[in-house]
Amino acid sequence: MIQRFLTTILLMLCASIFALGQNKITGIIVDADDEYAIPYASVSYKGHHVAVSCDGEGRFTIDLHEGWVLTFSAVGYESQIMLIDGKRTELKIALKSETKKLQEVIIKSRRGRYSRKNNPAVELMRRVIAAKEQSHLENHDYYSYNRYQKITFGVNDLQPDDLERGIFKRSPWLINHVEPCSYNNKLILPLTVNETVSQHIYRKNPKTKKEIIKGQQSDGITNVIQTGEVATEVLKDVFTDVNIYENYIRLLQHPFVSPIGETAISFYRYYIADTVYVDRDLCYHLQFIPNNQQDFGFRGDLYVLADSTLHVKRCDLTIPKKSDVNFVESMKIEQVFTKLPNGEWALTTDNMIAEMKLSNLLSKAICVRTTRLSDYSFDEIPKKLFSGKAKVKREIEAMNRDKAFWSKYRTVELTKAESTMDNFMRRMEQSKNYKWVITGVKALIENFVETSADKDKNKFDIGPVNTLISSNFVDGIRLRASGRTSAHLNPHLFWTGFYAYGTKSHKHYYSSEITYSFNKKQLAAFEFPQNSITFETTYDVMSPTDKFLLHNKDNVFMSFRAIKINQLYFYNRQNLRFSFESPWGLRVNGGIKAESNEPTGDLSFHELSTGNLVPKIRTTELSLGLKYQPGVTYINTKQRRVPINLDAPEFALTHTMGVKGLLGGQYKYNLTQFSAYKRQWLGSWGYVDTHVKAGAQWNRVPFPLLIMPPVNPTYLQSEQTFSLMNNMEFLTDRYAFWSVTWDMNGKILNRVPLIKRLKWREYIAFKGMFGHLTDKNNPFLPQNMTNTTMFQFPTGSYVINPRTPYMELVAGVHNIFKFFGVLYVHRFNYDNHANVSKNGVRFNFTFSF
């Protein structure tokens, strides 16, 4: 009897478990025409306020309620309903794109006509946009809030078969680190996690915003390599905070039109879906989609309070599947606004998930950004917290917070894999062949080879690796060995240098540079901000155009040149310089430099008056420069620091004074130069970069000290240089240079059938230079023929017409295979000069979203 009873109970329990397992409906929603999944479509029981959203692949799971009516909907598609009978638990729903009627106004889908006139959804959105200024937090004299942010990056969409082969078979302990992601219900392998706790403060008069970082820590694979900081900072910049109350949302390093921005009505199509309750607040549910889904915009849902405030209660943003965004397969942003004690509404939850894939050959990746905002206050804030120009301040102990601090401020718990990231890294470091794999990866990514297995103890780096071998006209094949010390040897004192040998010239070259940094560095002397003094001594060979190259002149890829460079010089340089940078974008630098130049190759120095050969010249100069770049942000790599916020304007002014008689200097001269840069975004039409430069050499000098236009002889396109001008083709003592480039982000090509599938992006540039050679420096004028200071111009050098600027046009496409560009270059004038090309083809390599 007891056995039968237990058996019955067991069967009932199993039946219950089975029933529970079947108490869900799962499925996928696709486009009826092409069978492509519709990401983030809505699935809801109308009238019951039960709803879910599909994931990035159109899949959903919702509770089964027999007898209820399930509605499937998506922006631009006709809704579909189904009576739930309890028999079907796996569904495939195909939505058609068709006209739908709303309150006697015809609103058509993406493939039909859409009218903004007399459209209730558009009228509602106009009211929402008009009301947003009334609810802006900046209406207060002060406000502050705390923010906790967690960014997790890892391998995405692991399948059960993946866990039984490859690296998981060789290292089965990795399986313990695999976990389901709560945002997309896929198996992921977290590789790095970064946490930041900060306080954000605002003052209306004078208007000031600051972020005070109170705590920051990271763990995972990014801590293994020094360039890991790049990955962390890039993730923060690419997947930055989203403020839908701004007109444009900067995301993936592009401005996306906000669904409630000033230009949103003309950019998006809006549809009223329903009125629903969201956490007991009655809201209008609106859906929206870009007019052209390949533009940089969102599709998604807005839940707007059905009261006089018309404030957004919740929003779900996604990137359309057909968007022109690179590498991102799907992205979803979830934001929730909460009513504060004073009756206002403020953002409290901001989640983002991005599923990425570099190519079919590389694994998928996932980035999850979790943000919580709390402790809003509108009390007066002490003035001392606003001191200084820096927008971001870091508390001294921010990087050294203990567990008690994180327990207090961590508003979202770490997952199991995130909390055991340190154990994961220790196991990885103990793995077979780990050392060799990491060494290879570091050499490839960082361009340096560390001499210690422990990066935290590494004191010397060998590299850059890509300068080991190169070539030029004088040296033929050139071999070079380079190295430098790191902050682990001394955080204030640094050395870098190289030895090189020319196999054709049989010349030996060297460079030695010592830097003392007054502020402590974590890795290298160039880290921002700089406050240092440097002494350099170098003997090497270069061409006048080498200073305009994109990369180190000894970079092996710089050896491939479209224009033959056969005029070079040896230089022996001693340079003492200082550099000071403020955290808010001001840089001051200067120094004293003594240098001897000896012509080589096809370059020679001949006195204008006698024609006698001058073996070399020597100069001594003092220099001072100012640069102002407000809002600039840098990340540090092994090779250099890289600006990641190219929206920051830049202004620079330098003056160089040659001193005759000091340290053997032979010439007195004064050179003044000014430059400015600004990026202007044009919404969905991309952006325009504008560079302007001007300068003057005020004294009579030999031609090596005149101004040479910026020439780039390589096959790589550069915004600030000319591609079809020859080396030293023009020599001037006055100049004004401009470069205007327009990256259209595929605005035109995305509307061309078939081509739009390639996601190519248009690129146009117009460059030019006005130049003038005053009479005192013109060697062709009779009155200068007896001057002993001036030299004969080298072969192939000309005097530019001051009324006729040199001009080039660049046009082409980039984003080919998501990283490659092909550009046509046309030279407008001065094509009667010797050995010039009127047309050419150049390339660029750019990874961008």
Image (cartoon, helix red, strand yellow):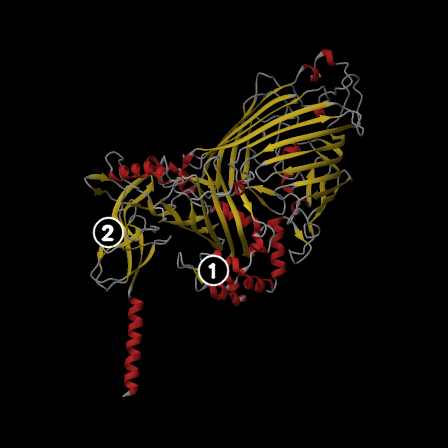
User: Which circle marks residue 80 in the picture?
Assistant: 2
Picture residue at 71% right of the left edge, 47% below the top: 483
Query: Can residue 110 be seen from the camera position used here?
Result: no
Image coordinates for residue 602, horizontal then vertical, percent? 73, 28
Q: Earlier in the sequence, mark 2 or mark 1?
A: 2
How many residues crowd mark 1 within 10 Å: few (<14), some (14–19), many (20+)? some
User: Which circle marks residue 74 in the picture?
Assistant: none
How many residues crowd mark 2 within 10 Å: few (<14), some (14–19), many (20+)? some
User: Which circle marks residue 414 in the picture?
Assistant: 1
Q: Quadrant of the N terminus?
A: bottom left
Query: Can residue 262 be seen from the camera position used here?
Result: yes
Tell me which amino acid carries mark 2.
Gln
| Cα distance in 3D space between marks 2 and 1 | 39 Å
Above or below for 229 versus 730? below
In-front residue for pair 303/69: 303
Residue 149 horizontal side relative to residue 43, left or right: right
Image coordinates for residue 433, horizontal then vertical, percent? 61, 62
- Give the secondary structure at mark 1: loop
- Give the secondary structure at mark 2: strand
